[in-house]
Image (cartoon, rainbow, N blue to C red):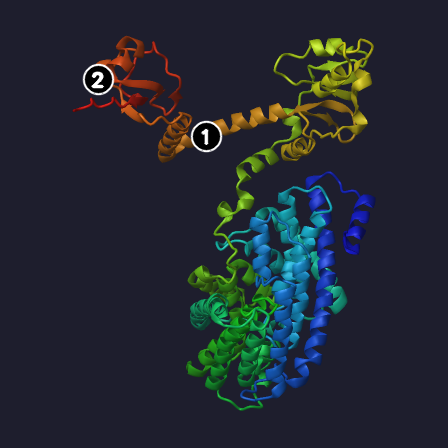
Amino acid sequence: MQPPFLRTLHALRRRLPMPNGHWARRLILSVIVGTVAGLVSAGLEDLLRLGTDHFIGTARHVGDASIFEFRWPVLVMPTVGGLIGGLVLAFLLNGDRTHGVVEYTNAFHRQMGRLRLRRPVINALGSIATISSGGSAGMEGPISALGAAIGSTFSRLFPLTPQDRRVLLVAGCAAGIGAIFRTPLGGALFAASVLYSDPEFEGDALVSSVVASVMSYATFVSIWGAGETLLPKASALRFESAVELIPYAVLGPVCGVMGIFFYGCMHTVEHRLVRRWPLPIWLLPAFGGLLTGVLACILPQVMDGRYLFLQNALDPAFYTPLGWSLLKWSALFAAVAVLKCVATACTVGSGMPGGVLGPSVAVGGATGGAIGALAIAVAPEGMFDPSLQYALIPVGMGGVVACAMGTPLAAVVMVTEMTGSYGLIAPLMLVCITSYVIGRRWSLNPAQVRSSVESPAHLADPIIHTLESWTVGHLMESNWALTVPPNTGLDELAARIEPGTRPVFAVAEAGELLGVVSVADITAIGAESASGLPGLLVASDIMTPSSDLVVVHPESQLYDALTLFGRTNHEVLPVFSRRRRAWVGMLSRRSVVDRLRAHFEEAREAMLEEHIGLAAIGRDLQMQQLMMTISPVRTERVQRLFVPIDAIGKSLRETDFRRRYGANVIAVEQRDGSCQCPPDLDAPLRTEQRLLVIIEDRPEPETD
């Protein structure tokens, strides 16, 4: 039985049929997915604020600069949260520790865009419990997976292709990221690029991602207000001079190293310690929460899941009351960055619900704060503007995200939107690209593939792109040869069926299509009559009416038409004009197949002519295919031979090749790589040819 949510959506689907246009379907669904994801993100944000304010917020303020303060609630709350998370992991998630971004990426590449709501909903709610109890985790990853699941759920309500389903999956992820980070463009780019470890985008989903992210962001700010960005105090920061590139040039590699360190912490806990700890699966997260609590007693900033510490660090007044030196501030930021990695590994790596995208942002900000304070402290007086200390914080955020998630360009745009300014765009680009190059091999998203070439989602791209570039109007037959009037008798129809064919007759009158008659219709009537085809029946009696036919339009893409062929199992589709609804022709499945075959044969010939190495491989593969068709016989060997010198200029028949050389020629390979099988027995053999032969092993004579 379906849940009420899906029953409601199916009811809406029946009342609001989707348009036929390829782009119209995607855009309308993207608007719906973005709006729903924005509402869900706003609701989860409210729950997170309530949770942190009423739980860990009552025990400790995680946004200040205090250190080494032991408090029992700080130690106990993450442990209790871990115990709850362990029970969720064991009994609701079946022990699967996959976090948000990885789950989304895996659904795109390996599950044809299918991602059900149950698990992302549990993870999102569980991550709120984790963060509210003081665990070091992020909401952003679970929200991205939940948005993707919303997109996938809506795609199940309509007869969409796997390609369209993946597009909505990406659009949903973009909507979640765009809302929770308040970065509509950055969310779209992140969702489209986090799928690959190379700096590559899922271009087919980019438009839908932008639309969904904009709608989600608009919905989110309508509820929470659009007055502030995530880092409002960073909007006035600017890149001032070329000399400032020095600390930024240092920050990039350091962010790359921190990304690698973060990966090492997560990998160590998830793949080594968790497997060796002699604890039941539901108790492991509680132990991880206990370790997080111990770290929080040293540095409470590791429990900050809402970036309060980093937001405060952008305010110069934050540093004044303590009277610390810049070197001490640098050490604090560095310690926060390191322990945040360890605490997140203890929390998320042990199995507590939550994501690693948010902690990546926090680690990057703390890394930038450490380098910024150090640069001002050691540089000669007046060399750098004091604001540089604060500018490196948002730039560091982008650096670690670019490295940890493999999304350098998306990180640049996201941080630009977080600050609400382009003032740091130049150093941000430098740091993100540098850190990405250094740490790209150690991404926190193991479900990534290197590029679209390696993704199962793109194996058929050459065919799909070709079909999408052609329209039905290019291949339809305007004058269908098998058009008959409605009073045509069944005997006459049967007489026009040629042996080995399965024609489809168009029943038309005065240029109007009344219906179609297939061979199956005729044979079904014949089977019902013991004496053959009834003589009184005519075409209009057995035809499928035009009102029941699946039709296409001249402007429709051939890819959509081929999808209809697959769903209906029809050999022919009627073509109607979109405006006048007039019958203009027929499209046959055979014409599409023949056109594709001719196109790829032309492409193959051009490719082999362009690339000599591929031509050689092509010949070898052709030979291998030919040899695979030969039944293996133990006493025979297949070989590829030069033409014997004494056989040049003579035919196989003249040389009596089998008797003279003890080999049976099954094919002749020409100079251009083509293969003649079976060979022409009377054609003269040439020097440049190769012979594919079966050589019979002659039994050795028996000896006494």
Q: 10 Å neighbourhood of mark 1: few (<14), some, or many (≥20)? A: some
Q: Where residue 329 sits in the image (x, y, percent)?
A: 50, 84
Residue 669 is marked as none
Residue located at (76% from left, 64% from top): 222
Q: Residue 645 carries which label?
A: 2
The amino acid pointed to by label 1 is Arg
Residue 289 visible in the picture: yes
**Which residue type does callout 2 highlight?**
Ile
The x, y position of residue 420, in whole percent, is 63, 67
| Residue 132, position as x, y percentages in the image | 66, 76
Quarter of the picture containing the C terminus is: top left
* Apparent side of residue 234 relative to residue 248 in the rendered image (left or right): right
Dot 2 falls on a residue whose secondary structure is: helix
Residue 95, image quadrant: bottom right
Q: Earlier in the sequence, mark 2 or mark 1?
A: 1
Q: Mark 1 points at which residue?
A: 604
